[in-house]
Each structure stands twice: as C-alpha cells, then as structure tokens.
Amino acid sequence: MPEAVLKRAQEELLDWQGRGCSVMEISHRSDAYVELAQNAEAKLRKLMNISDDYAVLFCHGSATHQFAMVPMNLLADRGKADYINTGIWSDKAVKEAKKFGDINEVKALVNRDGVFTVTDVKEWALRDDAAYLHYCPNETIGGVELHDIPVDNKVLVADMSSCILSKPINVSDFGVIYAGAQKNIGPAGMTITMVRKDLMGKTAARTPTLFDYKVLADNASMYNTPPTWAWYLADLVFDWLLAQGGVDAMAIRNSEKSTKLYQYIDSNPFYSNPIDKPYRSRMNIPFVLANESLNARFLAESEEEGLLALAGHRSVGGMRASLYNAMPIEGVEALTAFMDTFAKTHG
C-alpha cells in the first residue's frame, strides 16, 4: 500500500468526510457510501480505459474464488475451456475449473537446464470450440510473466491479481479480467472483476446467487453488504495512482525498478534468477544464492536492515522481491546495496 494512502486512511479513520464516524460505521446503502462506490468505479474505468461494454464488479473474497466463479458463469452446461498452465496459480485455477467443465490443460511452463521458460504458442493444443482461454499473465510465486496477449480471436480470461494497474492494457482484448486487491489495489478481502456484458447471464443452474456475475452487476456489487473498507481503500489507491500520472507512469517506474534489480542479479555470480529473460516478471523477482546454506543468514541480516518479506514461497524456496506499484525505487536501491554487501562479506 502506498504510504500516502495509509496516512490518509489513518487521518480519516475516526472522522470520514467530517461525519464524526468511520467509513466502516455508515450504511453501504447510504448516499455517501454509494457515491464513494460510484466514484471508485469511475476512477478505475478512467485508469484502465474500461468501456461501457464491461461491468466492473467489486466482489467479496479472493481471486481464488474466481477460479470457481469463472467456469460457473461461462460454462453453464459443462462446456469446454482451455487453460494455460504457467505456474502455481494457473495450476490451482485448472484444478478448480475441472469441477465444472471439460478443461483442456496446456502445460506451457518447462524447465530447460535449470531455467524456466514458456513454450511457443504454436505448441499449444487449443480447441476451436472452447468457450474461453484462461491464463495468468504474472505468476506471483514463480516470477513468470507473459508480457503480451498470448493469442488472438479467443475469449480471454486473465487472472491479473499481481500485475493489474502496473502497465497499460487493452481491456477490450479480454472477456473477463479479475484481480485480488492485495497487490496493487488495496487490502485483502476484495477482488475486482471486469466482465464483458455479453458473457453474463449464462450461469450454471446451481450457481450460488452471490457467484452470478449478472446478479452482482444488476445490483452494483451490493446484492449484500460489500467489503466496504477494502472498497474505500481501493478508492484512495485510485486517487493516488491518478495523482502519480496513472498507469503509464506506473509502467515506467516498474520497468526501472525491475531492470535495476535484474541487472544487479545478472552481474553478480553470487546470485541468479531462474527465469528465461523474455518471461521474467516485473512484479515478482525470485533469486537464489550460489551457496544456499546462507539463506537463513541472508534473511536474518536483511531483516535487520529493514528489508522484509524476502523469503521465497515455501514451494520454491530461495528469495523473492515483490515490486508492486507502491514500492519506490529507493526500496530496490536499498536491496541491491544490501545484496552487494552480503555477497562481499560471505562470498
């Protein structure tokens, strides 16, 4: 979360808009909160240039909920869908979708001599009659990113939880975009979903009401009490993004941050990144030490320097630096300075 947003939330916590109470204490159906919700959606539409052809939903829960909601809404009669598997989150989405339809899993991530890369799209066995193609543009855990739209002429469904608002995209290229809030939008507990309106209203018969995109859209994401605090904080983040220059400015900053860290890793044999360069993530940068017996010491000493949350995911080990929008370039500079000192001391 941007520091400016946290400070603003702190200032408004007990007295929002001069009302003498918190935004969490007013009704979500009050004029004041409805105005906040509408303004937040308008700001997001401006940031991402979202047309009226799309509903923007502020949903309860995590992106993991969408692993079920997508097939429930788009595969009403146990239809067919293609899923590109490039990492752990893709894999979880595949497993969930298989409960609802005929899912063709394309395992596109391969390990070639210790370097992870993505197979050529020409090798993907996609089906002409698939209702949609699902993929995860940025795999948070593995640090793999597909920087371009993988295929044309498909209904694309994208899990953008860890890369939304990090660079400009053409929303009209997609049928559905969903993103858990806790990376570039706000706190955990809310997922923003953009759905092309012609894809709604085709849910499976047993779809729970709150999992039906059309019900959510028809009720302005307020069929029941929404995640009001998360929605409010998202609105503050959208204000911050607009003040920074929008998504175009974020793209420049994110490129600078990731380039600086990758250049340092590649220049020092004490460290290495296991991802093929064309598929390296700008948001999540994993790296390993040449001597992995030093991992615990690296984490302990980095924490002493105020560098937190650098442990890689338990499934892959090593280290991982996440460079979401709120991380300033100074954070990367502090990390590379520490890494350099650590390598000189222990190399």
Image (spheres, grey):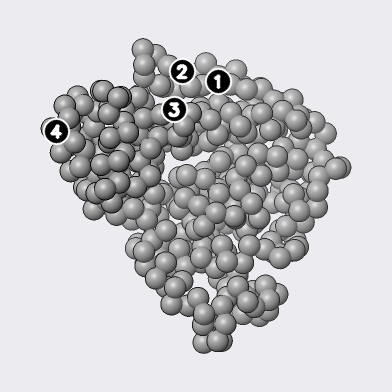
Q: CA distance from mark 3 to mark 4?
A: 26 Å
Query: Residue 37 location in percent, x, y?
Result: 60, 69
| Secondary structure found at label 2 | strand
Tag 1: residue type?
Lys
Name, please, the residue furthest toward the top: 113
- Label disc, if present, on residue 107 of the rendered structure: 1
Mark 2 sits on what residue? 110
Is 203 on the left-hand or right-hand side of 334?
A: right
Q: Secondary structure at mark 1?
A: strand
Q: Residue at x 71, y 65 (%)?
A: 225
Task: Between label 4 and label 1, give the one nearer the viewer.
Answer: 4
Where does label 3 land, which residue?
316
Q: Which mark is residue 345?
A: 4
The vertical placement of 310 against 88, above or below, is below
Q: Nearer the viewer, mark 3 or mark 4?
A: 4
Q: Which is nearer the N-term, disc 2 or disc 4?
A: 2
Q: Amino acid at mark 2?
A: Val
Name the residue located 66 percent from the left edge and 28 percent from the top edge.
95
> Label 4 to label 1, Cα distance in Å?
41 Å
* Residue 242 versus residue 320 in the image, above or below: below
* Disc 3 versus disc 1: nearer the observer: 3
